[in-house]
Amino acid sequence: MTISLFKTLIAISETGSFRAAADIVCVTDAAVGQQMRRLEETLGAKLFDRSERTPRLNQLGKAFVPKARAIVQAYESVLDDLTGDPGAIGELVLGAVPSTIGGLIPKTIKRLIGLYPDLHMRVVPDLSPMLLEQVEQGMLDAAVMSEPPRVQDNLIWMPFCEEKLVLLTAPDVPHADPMQILATMPYIRHTRRASVGVMAEEWLAKNRIKVNDTMEMGSLENLASMVAHNLGVSVVPDICVPDPIFQNLQKIPLSPDAPARRLGILTRADCSKIRLVQELLKQISLVVEQHAEHSK
């Protein structure tokens, strides 16, 4: 027995004839008759009165139609759940690197919930290496994070922007050569457990820059707070959608060879909410584009 038999039965009930139902389910009149005989044989019951030239639903057939509708609706609901239909999903568990929590993530969630008012979001802040593990283990539906060194076949990586490394300073630090500032001012490191921390350290080493590091911070937003109080400077990504503190700090371009952090969404290839994750990517891209336009 297939779901198509129930759909054909419903079409007959709605149109009143095999011929009209055939147009709806896109088969021939003869095929409709064959399907209904197969359904009757499977159920072990007669659903049609065939005493006249045009078969009509009998009392048992009419009583069975609501049950057929319920079966079709349940089947389609299951398919929606499996393909991640946003209207059928109750919760999206999203990981995010801390630098996105102050601007990008809340603005995106506001847009997403505007589209799907019944959607419940659970946001898990963490560093990219830990988010990678949680996505792999199925603990997160998706994560907004730095690009992994390698993307396994069971994962999907969807990039949406690049953030060039810059020298972050307090607004009142005189705009000067970044090398001079790095050589003379206290330096605040970003944790080496984070992808951006490793990237910054590699750039400093490549350019043989020795800094006077005074502290190390575990997240970019906390690091930015220290820089805002003029406790030092740091090499960080130029956050695509920053929080107000980062927005008001001075971002001085580095050397032409300065790398960029690539941000994107990581999810599993078998993620049951892939359609919602794709909509999330669309809304994130719109938020990034909108901020870029306003910043010009």
Image: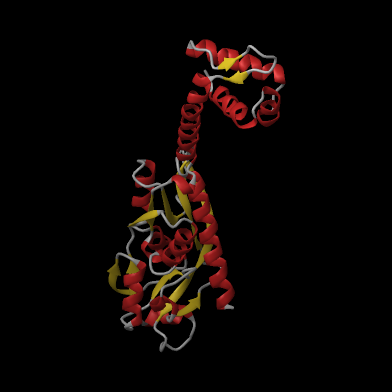
Q: Quadrant of the C terminus?
A: bottom right
The residue sitting at 41% across, 65% down in the picture is 106
Q: Is residue 47 left or right of residue 215?
A: right
Quarter location, residue 246: bottom left
Q: Is residue 214 left or right of residue 105?
A: left
Estimate the x, y position of residue 245 in percent, counting from the top left: 38, 78
Colour mapping? secondary structure
* Residue 95 vertical position relative to residue 243 in the rendered view, above or below: above
* Residue 149 vertical position relative to residue 68 in the rendered view, above or below: below
The residue sitting at 49% across, 78% down in the picture is 252
* Residue 83 vertical position relative to residue 278 in the rendered view, above or below: above
Estimate the x, y position of residue 54 in percent, counting from the top left: 68, 18
Whether residue 44 is visible to the viewer of this picture, yes or no, is yes
Can you name the residue that lies furthest to the left here?
Answer: 215
Q: Is residue 123 left or right of residue 156?
A: left
The residue sitting at 49% across, 55% down in the picture is 280
* Residue 111 vertical position relative to residue 53 in the rendered view, above or below: below
Q: Relative to the observer, which residue lies in front, 234 or 25?
A: 25
Q: Relative to the observer, which residue lies in front, 186 or 158?
A: 158
Estimate the x, y position of residue 165 in percent, counting from the top left: 48, 68
Estimate the x, y position of residue 31 in percent, counting from the top left: 67, 18
